[in-house]
Image (spheres, helix red, strand yellow):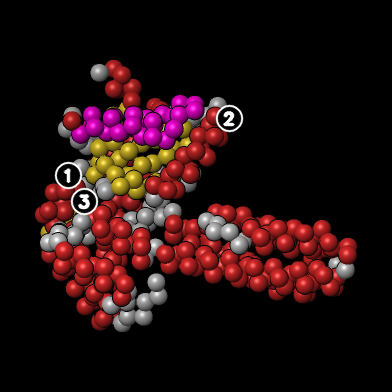
Amino acid sequence: MQYKDTIEQSKEYLRLAVSHMSRFKVPFDPVNYSVWYEYVSGNNKELRIDLDHAMTQTQSITPELNKNLFEKYIVPDQKQILEKIREELRKILENILKHVSDAGGQLNNFGSVIKKFSQELKQDLDVEAVSRVVEGILNETKEIMQSGANLRERMQESADKVEKLSRNLEQIQEQATTDLLTGAKNRRYLTTAFYEEAHQADAAGGDLCLIIADIDHFKTINDTHGHLVGDKVLKRTADLIMNYVKVRDIVTRYGGDEFVILLPSTPLQGAVVFSEKLCGYFKNLNWKSKDKSQSIESIHLSIGVAQYRKGESLETVIQRADKALYKSKQEGRCRVTSETDLEAA
């Protein structure tokens, strides 16, 4: 969605959106805010009609309704961008085919491959599939350029355009795998990353651990200081965790105030030591609410740790880590529990 609102307009839309969300007790998360921003700004007439209709039919607006409106009216923008990229790529391929045809029969093999890519782009491909096609086009273009000096100059323009579209795809892919509020990776990314790391661990006989970190008493923070402060706590927590882990470790927001961290090449005991240090790090931090100049209670983490076992699904590992997290909560919070602690209990 393209926005051209002034600062003053956006401030007013913020005020109106928050007012509506408070009225219907809608959680202040980025998805819900996007829906109500679109509503109060009048940018999305179809969304406004649907929401007005819903408000006349019922006194409550559910998070599920907000999610449906977000997916129906806001997420499709990404699909439209992707479709435009596919269309641009097909035009570039037509141009490449013309250059290949002008060069003569010695490049017929390249022409067949280019036609194959063009056919693939007519399908409703996702970001990953289009990215694979782009990579193939770039490789093929480089080979064509090496086949004849007279083609290099004409092909370079096409190659530059494909490179630019490739960067656009990377941006879309980054947005699709990033949590809007915290900047951490999201559950979609976690699923892909877990199976990639699990495959490497299986092949090399290495270790892979998963931890779930939950912010203690987060509901109290929201109730006491408001959802906007709660969102800032989530963002700051994500930043601190991402800065604390090693480069190869993967931090994802799993949902609500829970974060899942993948620790490749890390045995269970190493993951427990890491978790205890992370828990202690948060325990010693001082938090302030800048907006109200009042102190926020120390932000503590409860953590559950589990180790991947060959052939396991992500859900199975998360279940064990979640049970360990629950035990941490039961035993007083601000502590670390591993799956071996469950077995010993």
Left or right: 222 in relation to 276: left
| Quadrant in which the C terminus appears | top left
Q: Earlier in the sequence, mark 2 or mark 3?
A: 2
Q: Earlier in the sequence, mark 1 or mark 2?
A: 2
Dot 1 falls on a residue whose secondary structure is loop
Residue at the spot 19% in from the left edge and 47% down from the top edge: 218
Q: Are marks 1 and 2 in contact (CB under 8 Å)?
A: no
Q: Quadrant of residue 22?
A: bottom left
Q: Quadrant of residue 97?
A: bottom right
Q: Is residue 229 visible?
A: no
Residue at the spot 65% in from the left edge and 72% down from the top edge: 91
Q: Earlier in the sequence, mark 3 or mark 1?
A: 1
Dot 3 falls on a residue whose secondary structure is loop
285 or 78: nearer the eye?
78
141 or 70: nearer the eye?
70
Three-letter residue code for mark 1:
His
Q: CA–CA distance between discs 2 and 3?
A: 42 Å
Mark 2 = which residue?
Answer: 204
Q: Which mark is residue 217?
A: 1
Dot 2 falls on a residue whose secondary structure is helix
Mark 3 = which residue?
Answer: 286
Residue 111 place in picture, x, y as percent: 78, 62
